[in-house]
Image (cartoon, helix red, strand yellow):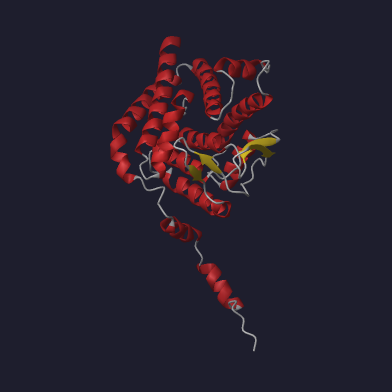
Amino acid sequence: MHHSFLPSLPEAVRLLVKFNPATFLNKKLQNMEYNYYDFKKNLSEIKESLALVDDLKVQIDNKKSLHKECWIAIQEKLRVDWTYDSNAIEGSSLTRGETLFFLKEGLTVEGKPFKDFLDARNHAEAIDWLYEVIKNNRSVTQGLIKEINALLLSGVKYTPAINETGQKIQKPANPGKYKVLPNHVLKTDGTIHFYTDPIHVSDEMEILCQWINENIKNSHPLIVGSIAHYNMVRIHPFDDGNGRGARLLMNLILIKKGYPVAIIKNETRRKYLAAFNQADKGDIYPFLTLVAVSLINTENIIVEELRTRS
């Protein structure tokens, strides 16, 4: 006798109607080994930083409408700073001056890898595209995050990787496509940190997008942006461009809510990487603090520029 283990057609339809994606994702979130989104205990610890962030934002909002030309110049400066620092964190050899010269004049500097200039152009164009996303009021989706990655890797043929024997290799780039092979990083203490397995990436990225869209409405954007930034790096969904993409995602959230960008400075790279390690162990306070300091730094630059140019 032949037994079918598939539900009958009416039963299958009933099961489909009952399926709720939000409930499904919430269950997956609860079943994760560690809930990487629940950091309520850390929020009271950075209340003072959030108050300062908000106070500086009010000062900027009151002044920027009075100095429109000045505001355009400030935005251009931040575009260069953000591009320089974000790429330098990932190993770009360009100085801030070379980044500015290339973005302004389109001229490369002798002796520097062409990919570093390509990365600078792509990052600056990705920033410009973010403002289009905000103008069109697009919500955060997996498709949008893939578009960010495709922009960052536009024209890039190969990405650096390390094979099973620890040798540095070049593998074909896959702009805007999730990884198909596992990726990992060698940490400063000599241990290997493995990121989310490719088979779980799509589910985890859906959880991330849903979490952002649910929390952006009522939570402070610095908290939402920081936790989104951390989780995208934790998942490492792409072969390349994960760090730059996560910083763009964080700043997309900040800009959406009317805040300036948090530029993680290259000179804080060691502290930045250490903060990721601490967050992996359940303590995101150092990471939230580092992002808050970065945002306050940007705000202080803006306030000073508005004061001196007015």
Can residue 259 be seen from the camera position used here? Answer: no
Q: Residue at x 62, y 34 (%)?
A: 152
Tell me residue 235's x, y (percent).
51, 46
Residue 31 visible within the image: yes
> Residue 31 sits in which quadrant?
bottom left
Q: Residue 222: horizontal and vertical position, in percent?
A: 40, 35
**Residue occupying image coordinates x 50% and y 34%:** 247
Q: Quadrant of the N terminus?
A: bottom right
Q: Is residue 258 above or below residue 28?
A: above
In the image, 140 versus 225, the foreground residue is 225
Query: Which residue appears at 66% of the width and 40% of the height?
Result: 175
Q: Quadrant of the C terminus?
A: top left
Placement of 291 over or under 27, stated as above or below: above
Can you give x and y, in whole percent of width and height, for residue 306 in the image? 43, 15
Q: Is residue 175 left or right of residue 89?
A: right
> Whole-percent x and y of residue 260?
45, 28
